Amino acid sequence: MSDVICVTNRTLCRGDFLGRIEVIAGSKPAAIILREKDLTEEEYRALASQVMTICERLQVPCILHYHKKVAEKLKASALHVPLPVLREMTSQERKAFQMLGASCHSVSEAMEAEALGCTYLVAGHIFATDCKKGLEPRGLFFLREVCKSVRIPVYAIGGINSENIRLVKEAGAKGGCIMSGLMICDHPAEYIKEMEFLDENSTDNCRQ
């Protein structure tokens, strides 16, 4: 199993989105987070049902994003939410998911999310990225402090690529979240394998 989580954005996708999901899932990432923020709840539910079917067949965790009601209706086992949404969920709602994740932007947020029952965290953004253009990245020191503050796995997000994934793991992260790279690359399966190969065999040519 890879240490890469795919975060989707179908608006960036080249070609058929579900076809790309199939290829990515077949490459066995740690999980696929279906993050399609522009869709209505009903539109998201329809897409989630299709993506969950693909992921279930290929035995890759499909983590639904934000829409907890959709997750409940589809009997999803995994959900990722912003911290404000996590705070609003009841204990029973949180315990309904085998995998429950939240995005954190400080050590205190990470500790709070863990206390509220999260099984993993996403911390960022770590490196400069077009998704957060103009915003200063929080960097590896921030990531290291977050990882030291919790006992659950932490995945870094923001500018993660084959040149720096080793650095985030050295900082204590379980792995990294990739969005645009997997949505726009010509060969997603090769992209994931390259990330794994370079992580295992990287040398000092990696740069921050």
Image (cartoon, rainbow, N blue to C red):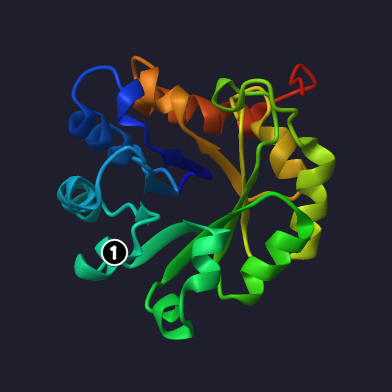
Residue 130 vs 8, above or below: the answer is above
**At 43% across and 39% down in the image, what residue appears?**
7
Q: Position of residue 110 (x, y in %)?
A: 69, 61
On the image, the x and y values in percent for residue 27 come to 34, 37
Q: Amino acid at mark 1?
A: Ala
Tell me which corner region of the image, top left, top right, bottom left or bottom right, holds residue 97. bottom left
Residue 204 in which image quadrant? top right
Please, which residue is most extreme toward the bottom here? Answer: 92
Residue 9, placed above or below residue 45: above
Say which residue appears at 72% left-offset and 67% top-offset: 111
Q: How many marks?
A: 1
Compared with 144, 182 (above or below) is: above
In the foreground, 13 or 43? 43
Task: Mark 1: give few (<14), some (14-19) or many (20+) Cα within 10 Å.
Answer: many
State the residue position of label 1: 71
- Quadrant for the C terminus in the image: top right
Which residue does the image show at 18% across and 51% down from the upper left? 42
Q: Position of residue 72 (x, y in %)?
A: 27, 70
Residue 11 visible: yes
Residue displayed at 41% across by 72% down: 98
In the rendering, at what x and y percent does residue 77 appear?
33, 68
- Of 191 and 41, nearer the camera is 41
Residue 151 shows up from this direction = no
Q: Nearer the viewer, residue 192 or 131?
A: 131
- Mark 1 lies on a secondary structure that is helix
